[in-house]
Amino acid sequence: MARAYRPDTIDTFLHTHGRNPKRERPMVKFARFALAAFLGFAALPAAAEEVPILRIYAYDSFASEWGPGPALKAGFEKTCTCVVEFTTSEDAISTLRKVQLEGGATKADIVLGLDTAIAGEARDTGLFAPHGLDLSSLDLPAPWTDPEFVPFDYGYFAYVYNKEEVPNPPASFEELIALPDTFKIVIQDPRSSTPGLGNVLWVQAAYGDRAPEIWAGLKPHILTVTRGWSEAYGLFLDGEADMVLSYTTSPVYHAVAEDDHRFAAAPFKEGHFPQIEVAGILKTSEKQDLARDFLTYLTSLEGQKVIPTTNWMYPVVDLGADLPPAFTAQPKPEKLLSIDEATITANSRIWIDAALGALQ
Amino acid sequence: MPLSALSNSVLPLRPFRLIGGAGIALTIAALVILVLWSIAAAASNEPASARTSIDVPHLLAMTSIQAGLTTVLSLLVGTALAWALNRLRFPGRDLVVGLFASAIVTPGVVVAFGLLAVWGRSGWVNDTWQGLFGAPLNIPIFGLGGILAAHLILDGAFAARILLTRLDAVPTARLKTGQSLALSPWRRFAVIDWPAIRGTLPGLAAIIFLLAFTSFPVVLLLGGGPANQTLEVAIYTAVRLDFDLYGAVLLAMVQIGVCATIVLAAAAFAPVPPSLGPSRGQRWSDTGGARTAQWLVLVLSILGFALPLAAILVDGFGSGLGALLQRPVFWRSAGTSLVIATLSAALTLLLALGLGLGRAATRNLALRTGIAAPSYAYLAVPAVVLALGFFLLVRSLGIDPEFAAPAVIILANALLALPFAVATLSPPLDAIALSRGRLIRSLGLTGARQFTHIEWPLIGRDAGVVVALAFCFSLGDLGVIALFGTQDFATLPLLMVRALGAYRTNDAASIAAIMLCLTIAAFVTIPRLFGSSADARA
């Protein structure tokens, strides 16, 4: 027994925990290097602190390499002595949850990317300050009067199809339901996806109390319900489904970026439900003026020129010849549906549960 | 307890190993509690929103059926495939083994899309069939069948990889004895192989069950609708849509409870340590029907497992790769991913060795379970809860989340890989303690020498698998970075998701293919590096 108690058992401990010098030295070096690299990352904003930093919370694809973020950042930084910094979350609702969690301690100046379906809930948090901008001249489906949120682009939810595969697309939810069960659509879960929620609101706005009946009718056509927009759109592009819930502007992406003109959005007789993306300034921001300047830039002609071919939505000002023709070639819905904000906030959970219940 | 008393007398006393293992276990358990507590604390600051009303028993039943089936099928397929791979020698075998191992660490959604590229409506199989016979072949890939198929690719191939490690480690002496006794293929499996893999099965089963139980994107994507859902979806809903943090914590605790039961049940199986000894690889081939069966298993598995992964590669290395490689953001993200993956792999190995050595130092069942069980916690805690909890924890410590992001991601990724690492390293360490304990005591080896001269040479190969696994897990992880990402701090999977969100399916496919290649390369090279270093010391 005594042998096992020899003092070198301390050695055992050290060695078994990886302090074996033979193996660790390169690792330590590497760790130091990596730590330095990380500190480098983190130190960037800290070093730049003399110049004011405008911190914007946005969803991932907005701030990404392919989104409008980089161009907007570069464009605005030319006009201000400031640095624009995007902090990203998976999606729009996560950005709201993040500032809710951070509350008064949030460093965010602007939350960007909320949409009209969750604007009411965001407003009720009391975290947002009036923007004080005159937005009456904006080109939107309806005149803009919101005192807190500034719209920066919009689109309409629609089912997108491939013209070669589907020569006669359905022209309403009821026509879609009447098709054989082999005609498949992909939609998104309203609990985790903005278009998914938009779809629920769309059916609700079009059919009211008949909405559960429509959902039950759609059930045999629904191939699957995905977590997010990109999985659903991917399934559609891979040919797994005939139509996908997306936006009227989705075919424009294929036409402009890929010169692929096979895709179209099916116009529905019931009318279409719009999604308007908005940004808001936080009350706790110490850079109210700078934030306001950014929102002014965002809704300016120059800022808006970035939007169509990066976020693939309609701009909120008339860009004239700067709007790619594919956007104007795409018919805008003849009839627009809407539900007022208070009704959405009070009922969206009930409608989601009813829709999911009918699909179960 | 005569057996345990006997065993105890065999083990050399290593109090520091015990303390080290217990310390790691306690720290991990404390971290889980802190994560949940920080969310609950944040919840109490929020006004009570609409409380989530979900049918927990129904969800539990649905999820358990799916996870149970996945587990049974994965273990069956995994055992058959490991058996075939152990016996057969063919050119490119290492690549095939690497390919199989890479499935589990590839993001589930990517694998699901690979599966559809082969078996879907417009997939290879259906296109070929239609070309040959003119009519579409309707393969029911959506629904429970699709979920099971995707899980089988993810988990069955993983099971095969782990079991193959155990079979490949069967001592040459044992094989020679078996060969001289002219054991039939079936007797050979029962007498030599089964004892070698038996000890690994309960831990493996627990892991696969937990993975399937908490699987989320795959279940939603291939499930076909809200009827096929998991508790994880409900938790996600509570956090994201309802902002019902309190409900989310309660649901997470239900999930942790279920998962803990599974882990404890697995731990209750008396561990059967595999036999150990120098292994020079398999030179004894089966003949006749068994060999035909092995080839059949291999060919079917390659078709089933490798085709979907090959589809990802074909898709990704098409057009658009060049444009992606010219983007600086790609190289930045790749660099970040590699640094994070390397560090978290190193951390995983350290923690797993600490836990495994501590566990092997005692025969006390409660203590052994106590040391291993907390490492499983991170499979049970939903990623959305984990990310949220870490975010709140870091903030309440007064640290800027952006500053803490790299450290948190490394830690979280290491913890995610830890159950796999513990399940891989623990059985051989146990076996060493049991079979070599007497020798170690009689030689009076110090713990350090015990490790460098006896344990490391014998577990080097397993350690290599652990490092490769942890490296690739971290490379493909999407769960935690989502709440911590900024425009400048991105990893490859995050970049992939961003590309997908911006219609750039080509770029996303290329990134997925590159990640898959890195994963396969890691699985082919890392275990070999570790194996040779261990052999050199032996």
Image: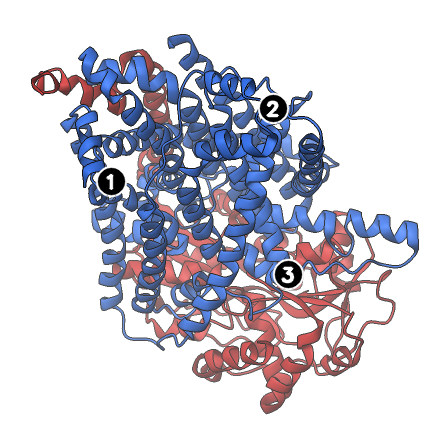
Q: Nearer the viewer, mark 3 or mark 2?
A: 2
Q: Residues within 10 Å of mark 1 (few under 14, many from 20)?
A: many
The amino acid pointed to by label 1 is Arg
User: Which quadrant of the structure image shows residue A197?
Assistant: bottom right
| Residue A208, image quadrant | bottom right
Q: Secondary structure at mark 1?
A: helix
Which disc, if any, is residue B392? none
Q: Which residue is mark 3?
A: A313
Q: Amino acid at mark 2?
A: Asp
**Dot 3, how many residues are within 10 Å of its Cα: few (below 14), some (14-19), or many (20+)?**
many
Subunit of label 3: A
Between marks 3 and 2, how big is the CA–CA gap?
A: 48 Å
Q: Which numbered disc flags the more N-terminal residue, 1 or 2?
A: 2
> Is B221 on the left or on the right of B167, as rendered?
right
Which chain is drawn using blue?
B
Q: Under tag 3, what secondary structure?
A: loop
Residue B88 in sight:
yes
Which chain gets the red colouring?
A: A
Residues B217 and B230: in front is B230
Residue A228 in picture, x, y percent from top left: 56, 59
Q: In the rendering, at what x and y percent does residue B427 appear? A: 36, 33
User: Residue tagged by mark 1?
Assistant: B368
Residue B89 shown left or right of residue A172 in the figure: left
Amino acid at dot 3: Met
Residue linked to disc 2: B94
| Residue located at (42% from left, 45% from top) | B481
Marks 1 and 2: CB-CB under 8 Å?
Answer: no
Q: Secondary structure at mark 2?
A: helix
Estimate the spatial distance between the alpha carbons at disc 3 and disc 1, rounded to whole Å. 58 Å
Q: Nearer the viewer, mark 3 or mark 1?
A: 1
Q: Pick whichever, A336 or B25, lies toward us.
A: B25
- Residue at (61, 26) in percent of width and height: B87
